[in-house]
Image: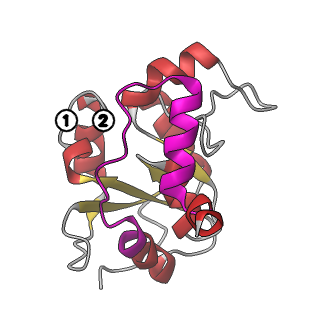
Amino acid sequence: MLAALSMTPWFYASTKAYVVGVPYSTMTRHPNWKAAMRYVRAHARSGDVVIASFALLARYYGPPLPLYHLNNNMLDIILRDNLRDGQGRLLEYTSGAPAITDLATLRTVLGDHRGAWFVTEKFRFHSPTPTPIEIREYIEATCQLWPVAVAPDMIIWYCRRSATVSSPSPG
């Protein structure tokens, strides 16, 4: 039983948070990440990227696409630990996903990929700390909201790189 529990992303994230000293991370919320990422997996295409507020869950449940982290609640830990990849990008500490810390970085990521799936919990998207206002406004202005009935506490946006790239339509 313990072996099965230790394989879940919730257990891993909670353990990792405890080890690095995150006192406010009890992982008591369990939004519908599995359903949301199943939806992205069904609609994503080659060349897409996933940008998630909980990159570990996106990696665990999601498609095998490039992954980025967008959740500035964790920015203090990311900056404190200063974990970086070979390209010098800041990394989120549980998933190893590069962190998006500002609008310029987000625009670079979008320019480097055919399309982007933004996946987050509603409470994180509508709060200015996890999702900075300028980033939220940019996403709302340039991306298409994909409602997912089986994951009502989640928000999924799809943003395509340019008007010349056809966008899948919400299903």
Residue drawn at point x = 36 percent, y = 29 percent: 73
Residue 141, image x, y percentages: 23, 48
Residue 107, image x, y percentages: 47, 38
* Left or right: residue 26 compared with residue 128: right
Q: Which residue lies furthest to the front in this view?
A: 1
Determine if the magenta segment contains residue 49. no
Image label count: 2
Which quadrant is home to the N terminus?
bottom right
Q: Magenta span covers which residues?
A: 7-36
Determine if the magenta segment contains residue 26. yes
Do tag 2 and tag 1 residues touch (Cβ < 8 Å)?
yes
Report the front residue among 49 and 143.
49
Instruction: State how far apart marks 2 and 1 are (Cα).
Output: 6 Å
Residue bearing mark 2: 131
Type of amino acid under label 1:
Ser
49 is higher (above) or lower (below) than 81? below
* Crowd rating for badge 2 (residues with CA inside 10 Å; few <14, some 14–19, many 20+): many
Residue drawn at point x = 44 percent, y = 39 percent: 70
Label 2 sits on a secondary structure element that is loop
Residue 31, image x, y percentages: 29, 60
Type of amino acid under label 2:
Thr
Residue bearing mark 1: 127
Label 1 sits on a secondary structure element that is loop
* Left or right: residue 142 compared with residue 53: left
